[in-house]
Image: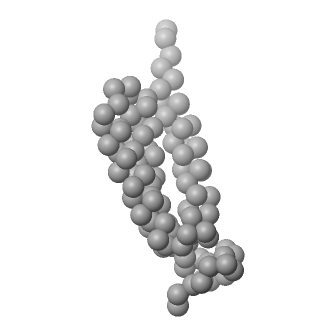
Amino acid sequence: MELNYNGIIIGVLTFLVIGLFHPLVIKAEYYIGVKSWWLFLFLGIVSLTASLLVHDLLLSVLLGVVAFSSFWSIGEVFEQKKRVEKGWFPANPKRKRKK
């Protein structure tokens, strides 16, 4: 009997990608602000395009996960701004905030 590890590998990689994007959103909002949503949009479009062009199934799936994690992060940047305003996360003292 041959075991297929693709599901487990995809699950672990998805877990790691999502885990990576959480601090990326926090850092992006801290250093750049909500303008960083453009970076996540760009990364999402590039990853989505690459996912369509790659022939390896595992890599294509991973790029798709990165793409949609990037798209999800766009909304999270704006939510992070609200969390900072509530005092749940520190604000960057070197960056002026608009009220």
Give coordinates of residue 15: x percent, y percent.
Answer: 56, 44
Seen in the picture, residue 71 relative to 97 is either above or below; the reply is above
Number of callouts: 0
- Image point 52% across, 90% down: which residue? 99
Name the quadrant containing residue 91: bottom right
Residue 26, visible in the rendered structure: no
Give coordinates of residue 68: x percent, y percent.
Answer: 40, 51
Q: Is residue 71 left or right of residue 8?
A: left
- Image point 41% across, 48% down: which residue? 67
Seen in the picture, residue 6 relative to 35 is either above or below; the reply is above
Q: Nearer the viewer, residue 36 or 55?
A: 36
Give coordinates of residue 38: x percent, y percent.
Answer: 42, 63
Q: Nearer the viewer, residue 34 or 7?
A: 34
- Image point 54% across, 79% down: which residue? 82
Outermost residue, top direction?
A: 1
Seen in the picture, residue 42 relative to 58 is either above or below; the reply is below
